[in-house]
Image: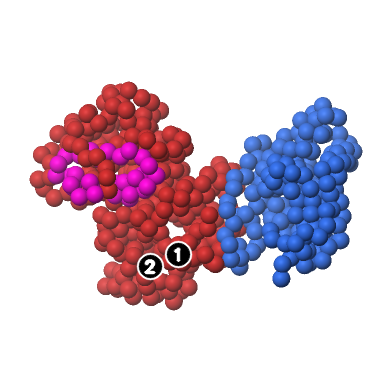
Chain colours: A blue, B red
Amino acid sequence: MEGIPKNRIMDEDGIRRAISRISHEIVEKNKGTKDLLLIGIRTRGVPLAERIQKRIAEFEKVTLPLGLLDITLYRDDLSTIDVQPVLHETRVPFSIEGKTVILVDDVLFTGRTARAALDALIDLGRPQKIQLAVLIDRGHRELPIRADYVGKNVPTSRREIVSVCLQETDGRDEVLLLEKKS
Amino acid sequence: MQWRHKDLLDLDTLTAEEIRHIIKTAQPMKEILSRPMKKLPTLRGKNVVLLFYESSTRTRTSFETAAKILGADTTNFSVAVSSVNKGESLLDTAKTLQAMNVDLVIVRHSSSGAAEFLANVLEAGVINGGDGQHAHPTQALLDFYTLQEKLGGFEGKKIVIVGDILHSRVARSNVLGLKKLGADVTLVGPPTLLPDEMKYLGVKLSYDLDKELPGADAVMALRLQLERQQSGLFPSIREYSKLYGLSLERLKKTGKKTIVMHPGPMNRGVEIMSDLADSVQSVIEEQVTNGVAVRMALIYLLIGGGTGNVVD
């Protein structure tokens, strides 16, 4: 994603604290860890889900099952985009039937990724509940979708790009606000 | 890596990287095949035509299953019930398909080059499902997928392909791709069924199966194409079987845990014995499953969007 850096929205500590809070909120809202599953949306939802899994394991002594979801085949813009997305594996090696699924992604923007993830998930089974956890909610929704757990709300303009960098995928932890090159 | 082709006619136009990209794309497709609910919305509204001028069970059903799982509609255009019986030419059939705005045509034809002809006249993508004695790229690709899964790679692996090389489009496509991927390929068959021209691809030719088996990582038996045999190519099926038929006993000569492949349909007791075909070393059934995954990958790559990069 090309752009001119404008602002640092979150640093390493900020991300760590946000993950920690979200982890506590998940357990609090669901009154424990019973029937909870974590599913990270590729690419950056996966390391975030792993961090939540680790954090919950630290204070609840329970390791939640973790799956990975690739939503490429469920996108609604495949026939119009210029560059074909590369397909990756979906790995959910457990039943989601009747469970509470926490979907994890890095940024909530138009809501189209979350919509695709919901469809992808429901094709795998019928969960009791699906909740959405995101590190950044930047607004501009195009669908009636909202997050249950938000690391940080960031008001943005459509000309801006929110770039989430994580140690596991980018070698460092930070969230940047970029201005699109015109 | 970005997909650049409108059609898949043979493997000679693909780079090693593109072949690996197909194999990589087929991996997530295989996961979908293991789901209880095998249906995706990806290619909703796309129409895939299966144009089969030659009989086929597994290739046609494999393509049809692949297209349907991806959400496309399929139209079967089988020769027995089509206008071809009334004398319609391939060109006119192509024009008819074009007028129906189909997105992808899978074609099998007894004439080599039929798929390329269609690709040149159609705006829709074309996948060669086997043309004459020329090429059968999707079979080769599913073989590569299976080899990748079982052997973990191609570099320096010894692959022995044994049987009726002369009539085999499967062997030709396999050799083309396997050489690109860096495998060490040996073709084995009786002199009358093993054309010397195959050497040009840099593969080893041999008439003696037992001599070539030691060290083989995979052995691929080809179907003896009884319907294509002219008389006199070999003395008898019994002798052919004795010299080139694969059995559990014979496979021990590899001295390894060799995998055995066959593109199907098998002539049991001719090129492959039942004890081997049904053994744990046989990956023949898995080849069929992998075939659906690989075809899903190809259909996705060809008509799953991203038209900005298509150059041919």
Query: CB of mark 1 within 8 Å of CB of mark 2?
Result: yes
Sequence-wise first label, 1 or 2: 1
Is residue B69 shown in magenta? no
Q: Amino acid at mark 2?
A: Ala
Predominant SS along the magenta part: helix
Vertical placement of residue A82 versus A66, above or below: below
Quadrant in which the N terminus of chain A appears: bottom right
State the residue at coordinates (37%, 54%).
B11
Q: Which residues are magenta?
A: B171-200
**Residue B200 percent coordinates (x, y):** 24, 49
Kind of residue at badge 1: Lys
Q: Chain of mark 1?
A: B
The residue nearer to you, when weighing B107 against A82, is A82
Q: Is residue B225 visible?
A: no
- Residue B109 in view: yes
Give the residue displayed 83% in from the left and 46% down from the top.
Answer: A11
User: Which residue corresponds to mark 1?
Assistant: B6
Mark 2 lies on residue: B119
Which residue does the image show at 57% across and 60% down from the upper left? A84
Distance from label 1 to label 2 (Cα)? 8 Å
